[in-house]
Image: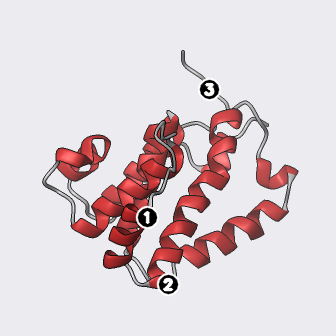
Amino acid sequence: MTTTQSRLPNPAVLVPELKDIGGALYKATGNGAIPQTTISLVQLRVGQIAGSTYLTVLHTGNLRKAGVTEESITAVASWRDAPFFTDAERVALELVESVLTPNPSGERVPDELYARASEQYDDKALATLIMAIGQVCFFLPLALIGKPLPGVSPAEQWRP
């Protein structure tokens, strides 16, 4: 199915406060506590898990602009057996998967995973990583329900 417009008009026009919220989240996650590439890897994984082409294309583009290799970008979907990621990136990807996927055996983020994350990230970095997951998850319903067009600039993609 080819779509030439999103389902919604520009949500930032409909709800002007969205710009402030988005700006605050961007500022919080851009505090330098963790690499921007790690944030983009996590946010790409959210797009993949949720099945959002818009988020997948957006965060793939961000990773390309940051100079991440095509092999690494492609391997985000299968990161567990890919040789391209650091231990810190691996635990970040595991955290986002744990948050977004049900665990039939119980707790989504077990103490053991939190302990491994704490070995890779200090408290500020871990809090920043958590906010990065929250940032993309805040916009996830907009991506899935509003269906912005992948690869189209924000100014051009929303239904008039």
Assess disc 3: are there few (<14), some (14-19) or many (≥20) residues with their C-alpha within 10 Å of its C-alpha: few
Q: Residue at x 37, y 71 (%)?
A: 115
The type of residue carrying mark 2 is: Lys
> Which residue, given by chain and number where applicable, does mark 1 sit on?
111
Q: CA distance from mark 3 to mark 2?
A: 42 Å
The type of residue carrying mark 3 is: Thr
The disc at residue 138 is none
Image location (x, y in percent) of residue 100: 52, 46
- Residue 135 shown left or right of residue 37 in the figure: right
Total count of labels: 3
Q: CA distance from mark 1 to mark 2?
A: 18 Å
Image location (x, y in percent) of residue 63: 35, 58
> Which residue, given by chain and number where applicable, does mark 3 sit on?
4
Between 160 and 103, the residue placed more toward the observer is 103
Question: Element at badge 3?
Answer: loop
First reached walking from the N terminus: tag 1 or tag 3? 3
Q: Is residue 32 visible?
A: no
Question: Element at badge 2?
Answer: helix
- Residue 21 shown left or right of residue 153 in the figure: right
> Which residue, given by chain and number where applicable, does mark 2 sit on?
124
Q: Is residue 15 above or below residue 67?
A: above
Q: Residue at x 37, y 63 (%)?
A: 112
